[in-house]
Image (cartoon, grey):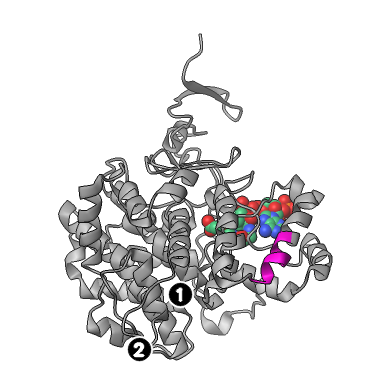
Amino acid sequence: MPSDTLTITDNRTGKTYEIPIADGTIRATDLRQIKTSADDFGLMPYDPGYMNTASCRSRITYIDGDAGILEYRGYPIDQLAEHSTFLEVAYLLLYGELPNQAQLQDWTNRVTWHSMLHENVKKFMDGFRYDAHPMTMFVSTVAALSAFYPDAKNISDKENRHKQIRRLVAKAPTLAAFAYRHLLGRPYVYPDNDLSYTGNFLNMLFRRVAEPRYKPNPVLERALDILFILHADHEQNCSTSTMRMVGSSQADPYSALAAAASALYGPLHGGANEAVLTMLREIGSKDRIPEFIKKVKAGEGRLMGFGHRVYKNYDPRAKIIKRTADQVFEATGKNPLIDVAVELERIALEDEYFVKRRLYPNVDFYSGIIYQAMGFPTEVFTVLFAIPRTIGWLAQWEELINDNEQKIGRPRQIYLGARTRDYVSMDKREAVIA
Ligand code: CMC
């Protein structure tokens, strides 16, 4: 008679335990009853990098890495990329359903309302050195917003939480655009609330001082919107888990989101799009690809934009991005690095090293080439990831706050260091070579 339990025999003691299985998981705390003696702490799972640990129950984003499936609230990513807009997807991620026309209009108005920055935030950003990395500016200024909106600390009030969510979704593009203009030494451009979310972003980035009204190129506006949809959420990755971890201490959403954005900055996560461009530039031409691949296989660096912890088949986002690239190039002219990227992908996908490890292009492999063709400097790429991921982080945060099972995040460790020893005075210490 099958039963939804796991029977474990501890060969140290000969004892047998029966542990319930729910949703294909066992509770790690159920292992604590497995002890060798009364004062034994109990068995713990050891899982560096959380390779096989579910940290929450979620209803937001579904990924089947083997089948290459990504869905937001059950809607396949390719359908959303084709038919939806970023703000509609943002609503979907937060509220669980697609909005009707009136709901979308209301949501759009209420988000757009918050797109301006306090003048002192602008001054705060001015304080950065002329060459400050836009991602550093983004992270720090998001954290600083906590001081501008102290009401955000009241996280138990739903309407208050949602006000902060709308603020962050609205201000993320403004912060990003100001960081970009700071890098170029250009005056900031204020939001134009008559434009779409991405149209206004392009306005704040690229409007010239003498230009009375900015008219975004519709092809680039739509391409950016698609890219934003693709980046909006990706379940429990490094930055989202950071958002949940910091949020679990009941910190305000600005502080938690600054931490999440910091996690995104790393080259193994959202920083990969910048790293891909650097890599493609270094390779330079198709004939140098075999030499580069040889180095990667010898362990000298990674093929950036390849591989994923969850996708062991083609990343569905990469497929859509590759298609979007063709549309963008029609408007901007072809980015010559695309030929290097396509050839690099072809060679890697035929190479046993990558095939054996199931390494495929991920979302970052082609996005940077599009961003560069649109006129963005590489330093801005990761900020372009952070803007749309803001709603993903916040939807996950909202879910966390409403989840009665969640507690402050606090992993255990296996302690391997020295145990109780007496303090050694300075004159008796040996020089220890680290
Ligand atoms: N180039 C060369 N070898 C690789 C790569 C790569 N890009 N990715 C993984 N490997 C190898 C790795 O060396 C290891 O080989 P071995 O078994 O011989 O030691 C094996 O594949 C498994 O790698 P891993 O590091 O254990 O895999 P992971 O699941 O911990 O790492 C990853 C996932 C995304 C960090 C990794 O694939 C990587 O570093 N990729 C390049 C950076 C990148 O493109 N990051 C963006 C991820 S997608 C956007 C996002 O959501 O952030």
Mark 1 and mark 2 residues within 8 Å of each other at the beta carbon: no
Query: From the Cβ of disc 2, is ligand 1 less than 8 Å away?
Result: no
Residue at horizontal 28 percent and vertical 81 percent from the top: 121
Q: Dot 2 surroundings within 10 Å: few (below 14), some, or many (20 or more)? A: some
**Where does label 2 land, which residue?**
126
Q: Is residue 138 above or below residue 349?
A: below
Q: Is residue 152 left or right of residue 300?
A: left
**Where does label 1 land, which residue?**
135
Q: Secondary structure at mark 2?
A: helix
Q: Which residues are magenta?
A: 335-342
Q: Is residue 257 magenta?
A: no
Instruction: Compare residues 17 and 19 and report the one nearer the observer.
Output: 19
Residue 355, percent from left and from top: 75, 47
Q: Secondary structure at mark 1?
A: helix
Q: Is residue 190 above or below residue 220?
A: below
Q: Which mark is residue 327?
A: none
Instruction: Compare residues 211 and 350 and report the one nearer the observer.
Output: 211
Question: Residue 255, located in which quarter of the rendered image?
Answer: bottom left
Q: Is residue 45 left or right of residue 173?
A: right
Which corner quadrant holds the C terminus?
bottom right
Which residue ends up furthest to the top in the rendered image?
1
Q: Amino acid at mark 2?
A: Asp
Residue at horizontal 61 percent and vertical 27 percent from the top: 11
Q: Amino acid at mark 1?
A: Met
Q: Is residue 408 visible?
A: no
Q: Earlier in the sequence, mark 1 or mark 2?
A: 2
Kindly report the distance in space between the C-alpha atoms of the residues bearing marks 1 and 2: 15 Å
